[in-house]
Amino acid sequence: MKTLRAIATAVLVLAAAACADARPAATGQGLKVVAASAWEAGFAKAAGATDIAVIVPPGVQHAPDYDPKPSDLAKVAEADVVLYAAFEGFAGKLKEAAGSDAKLIEVGLDNAPAKVKAEVTRLAGEFGTAEAAKTWTAGFDAEYAKLKQQVTGATGGTPPVVVAQAFVAWAADLAGAQPAGVYGPQPPTAGQVAELVAKKPRLVLDNSAMPGGDALADVQAKRVVINNFPGQGFDLLAMYKANADALLAALA
């Protein structure tokens, strides 16, 4: 009986070790993360990853349409984890390039604060960096509250009427508002523009990656271009601050 127990225990130990080998390292140190764009990279950095490469260079206007070069896909071959979003047209190429070694993780890209914190926490669970993510989210809560206080303080005490492109509607919250109308994700049609005009907005939040441009010319409101993507440093907080500054300038 003791022999059978010893064998069973050994099997369980070996199975646990095999599962551990199949997962990323317990900490973010040395974990190679390849992100489809700076947006996923921002989430990864917030979650505690320290070795991050991106496929789409920061500054590319419409990342989902980027066509990766062979040199871009070579990064995937060395990755432990590959992050992508479902709406990115080249996601299939990343999956093919990843082979069987890299772990593929789909990221829900939405900069609404609650959704960001949920995804950062989830990724930290994958990376083994829960404490780093907890520290980041605490700092994020404090910084976001400060930015929101600054923007709402510039509204004169009344939340502005806001209409927004679908993927940047989250930014209305910085001004203490809920979008009165949402268009897109494609540029608005003539009928949609008429509906937006009828809302009599003070602000139109347009998407830097998918701008409405001339289609919004008839909407008599301040047009604020919101950028969802962090810059070279993959700093999500810097992205929020830049968008808060854009709102402050429009409300001045």
Image: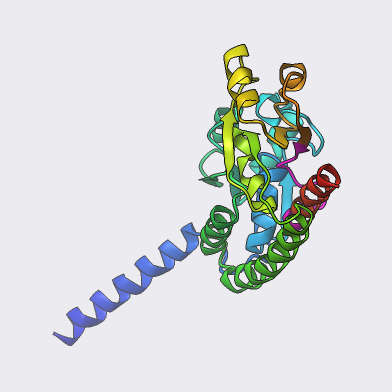
The overriding secondary structure of the stretch rendered in magenta is loop
Work out whether residue 174 can be spotted.
yes
**Residue at 72% in and 37% down:** 202
Indicate the position of residue 62 as horizontal and vertical percent values. 72, 28
Residue 24 in view of the camera = no
Q: Looking at the image, is 11 positioned above or below residue 55?
A: below
What is the residue that sits farthest to the bottom in this orientation? 2
Please say if 190 is above or below 209: above
User: 210 or 66, which is in the foreground?
Assistant: 210
**x, y (%) of residue 26?**
56, 69
Q: Position of residue 19 (x, y in %)?
A: 41, 62
Q: Which residues are magenta?
A: 225-237
Q: In this orientation, which residue lies closer to the viewer: 229 or 193?
A: 193
Q: Quadrant of the N terminus?
A: bottom left
Left or right: where 146 falls relative to 245: left
Q: Residue at x 55, y 29 (%)?
A: 92
Location of residue 36 in the rendering, given as x and y in whole percent from the top left corner = 66, 39
Q: Nearer the viewer, residue 109 or 227?
A: 227
Q: Is residue 126 above or below residue 86?
A: below
- Residue shown at 75% from the left, 32% from the top: 208
Instruction: Indicate yes or no whether the magenta region holds residue 229.
Output: yes
Q: Residue at x 53, y 34 (%)?
A: 86
Q: Is residue 71 left or right of residue 127?
A: right
In the image, residue 180 lies in the stretch drawn in magenta:
no
